[in-house]
Amino acid sequence: MKNNHIITIDGPSASGKGSLAKALAKELSFILLDSGLLYRAYSYCFEQSHNHSAAKSLFLNLRINSIDHEMHVFENNTDITSILRHENIAKSASQLSSLKETRDNLISFQRDLASDNGLVADGRDMGSVVFPNANLKFFLDAAPEVRAKRRHLELQKRGQEVNIHDLINDIVERDKKDRTRELSPLIKTEDSILLDSTNLDQESILDEALQHIKERNIL
Ligand code: C5P
């Protein structure tokens, strides 16, 4: 496994991982791995085939590009990223992500994104399973109500209207599944740094993360 300059950010849904990962990738000129988007893309492929080997082939035919330090997924030259961000895809990704076939089909794809250009990897098992030797590991958390409000705002901005109470329930339910599943559960590894974004805005969290990066002198 290539292992140069890898920073992992794990944590529950809507804890601010995506924003922090994007900001860090931009700041450090690293590549961004949004592993949640890959699980969503895989589940999009699985829904078309209901079979893991067919889903893997479909997945490998998608094109993954970085645009403005964000991952985008293309199917036959159509950008399907916004489709993958829908809550129904999040639910099916969450279900499929507990299966060994799904995780096995995605692990080497994720590892292959590591290169000499540096990588910021955002997900649930980046520091625990995919990149256990990462240079620096963060675990980003926030209170469930705060996370649900953030996700609500994010979905509204994308024109998706969802009930905030349903969203809180969905987020709590998905987190529970992610934390208690047998394979690659969401855990804070002992060697990761806890960042709590409950009362901090994106800029303050970025400053805190950059401070740790400087202190560790990893760049
Ligand atoms: O982060 P995001 O909400 O896009 O992830 C969608 C789902 O994919 C999560 O609910 C989780 O079940 C799964 N996932 C995972 N491991 C990762 C990233 C995401 O199991 N590294």
Image: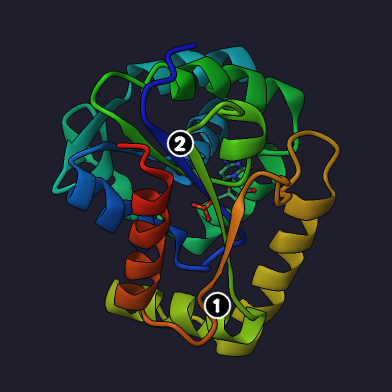
- For label 2, the SS is helix
Choose between 155 and 199: the one closer to the eye.
Answer: 199
Q: Which residue is mark 1?
A: 147
Choose between 131 and 150: the one closer to the eye.
Answer: 131
- For label 1, the SS is helix
Residue 71, above or below 54 = below
Residue 190 in view here: yes
Give the residue at x 50% y 76%. Answer: 197
Residue 80, above or below 86 = above
Report the side of 5 relative to 70 (left or right).
Answer: right
Q: Amino acid at mark 1?
A: Arg
Residue 128 in the image: state x and y as whole percent: 67, 36
Report the side of 185 relative to 109 (left or right).
Answer: right
Residue 209 in the image: state x and y as whole percent: 40, 60
Residue 51 in view here: no
Mark 1 residue crowding within 10 angstroms, few (<14) / some (14–19) / many (20+): many
The part of the image, by quadrant, that contains residue 3 is: top left
Disc 2, ligand 1: is the CB inside 8 Å? Answer: yes
Q: Which comes sooner in the sequence, label 2 or label 1?
A: 2
Query: How far is mark 2 from mark 1, CA to CA?
Result: 21 Å
Give the residue at x 75% y 31%. Answer: 99
Tell me the number on the disc at residue 38: 2
